[in-house]
Amino acid sequence: MVLEEGISTDLRETLNQRGSDNESQSGDLVLGDTEGHVGDTVTIRGLQLPSNAELAVVWKTVVGNWGVIQANEIKGPHYQPKEVTLTDVKTDDSGTFEETIEIPEDYGSTHPIAIRNNGSTVANAEFEIFPHFELVNDNAELGEFFTVKGYGIGPNPARNNFQVSWDLGLVGIMTGVKNNGTATASVRAVGPPGKHDILVWRGYKGVPFLQSRTQSDFGPVGSETQNEWEVTVTEPETEPAAAWSDELIPEEPLSVHYPSIDRDTEATLTIAPNSGPPGTEAMISGKRFPENKSVNLVWHRHDGKRINGKTITPKPQPDKLPTVETDDDGTFEKEVEIPPDRGATRPIVAEVSGESVAVTGFIMQPKITEFSPTSGPQDTEIDIKISGTGWTLYENANFVVYDNKMLGYFCGNCDNGEDGIVHLNLPVSGGPGYHFIDIYPTLFETEKDGHGFECKPHLSYLDNHPIRPLPAHHFAFKITE
């Protein structure tokens, strides 16, 4: 298998797998179809193979993920070779077999299929997967969501970033870097009630290439499968929720973001739960500290400015957490309320006699702290405040989408004096009725961005975002007569 190196650094196709194994061949493998889509069934036939032999049908591919340094700097997509045995077959007396296989959930590209006899390749063929898309639901109440799923996405830059539009307005991007080339995107059902259009586009640098429907060198967007749908928005049975975030899931802090401690000891520091939004009630526990001694618990936030060339480092924040006293066994427990601050891992350091001797961490997750007002006339200015937006490059920029149209981004690393609270002030626009604001995660910056991932609403964030499962935030405003 020939793999071109480093799609994350030189943007070349990593699945250019044309050509056979460098092993001896003794037979032929014939495919009923040599191209298609994930989930297709294909008849394969082996000829001139060892007779009455148990053989393995091996699918060659890659496994993908994001290359990220220090859980912060995004290098880009990264792929490693992988092989999967699809099935086992047995030849007859003449060295022939016939079998039906299902094309696995995988990246779009050419995939070698090898027939192996005790580890040696005795026949080869190739199958090319083309991307395709499906609409899960074509009806949704106003304020709910339509779901688009993509299969066979990437890893080539021309097929690794697809754009989703609503009534010819760009909503955001979807990618299949993780998840074997499969991605899921949700698109808000915005008004007015009635018929609307959802399209999936393909374009370099994350921008739709409008000729992809007529004159693209890569053919139709969905390889002649459907990539445009008429959907119906219906009147809601109940009023849309004014403000809510995706459900948060438990997370583990990232020790790479801890500061170094002054002295190694046997002391241990833990916190439970170790993730949540500001205001979470948590228990900090210490063991094997000096007996009957004061322990200063010190909260840390990450300060610094990339734009000014100032390195972002964890810095102590005095008076955020209390000082505790150990007992005769050198242990303590203290219930605390997590203060508002920037997101990502918030280190907590235990100091004894001015020296740090133990460290733990709390994953600060985002939380909507204000959305007001929730109704008013055209041009009403609304205030949105969100606490817990992180400093790392995969989470410190969130993109605001208004009625399924890209508006702009905000940064979670601003010195605003509000304990890490992001403050937005926006004038609402549109006719009477409900209007919707959705705030999606983005990738603020990558080392090289030929894919077009940077600073765009990442609609497939739930199953393809780097490092952590970040939530999106959703709002509804009613413009009155």
Image (cartoon, grey):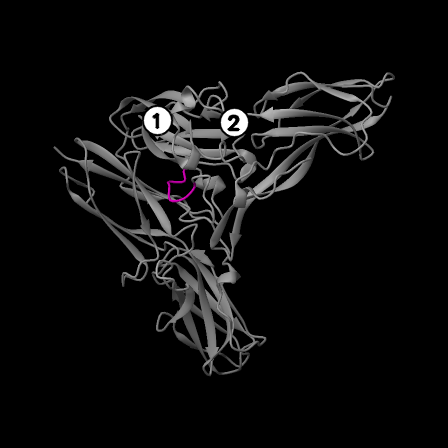
Locate residue 216 relative to residue 63 in the image: left or right: left
Residue 171 horizontal/vertical position (percent) = 34, 34
Q: Quadrant of the C terminus?
A: top left
Residue topped by disc 1: 140
Of the two numbered discs 1 and 2 on the same chain, state the one appearing first in sequence: 2
Percent position of residue 468, x then y: 48, 49
Residue on which disc 2 sits: 131
**Secondary structure under badge 1?**
strand
Q: Position of residue 18 (x, y in %)?
A: 66, 29
Q: Amino acid at mark 2?
A: Pro
Quadrant hosting residue 283: bottom left
Left or right, 245 with reference to 15: left
Q: Is residue 418 above or below residue 215?
A: below
Q: Nearer the viewer, residue 107 or 300?
A: 107
- Please tell me how many numbered marks the rendered image carries: 2
Residue 470 locus on image (x, y percent): 43, 47
Residue type, numbered disc 1: Ala
Residue drawn at x 47%, y 25% as measured from the top left: 133
Q: What is the magenta segment's predominant secondary structure?
A: loop
Dot 2, how many residues are within 10 Å of its Cα: few (below 14), some (14-19), or many (20+)?
many
Tell me the magenta residue range: 453-459
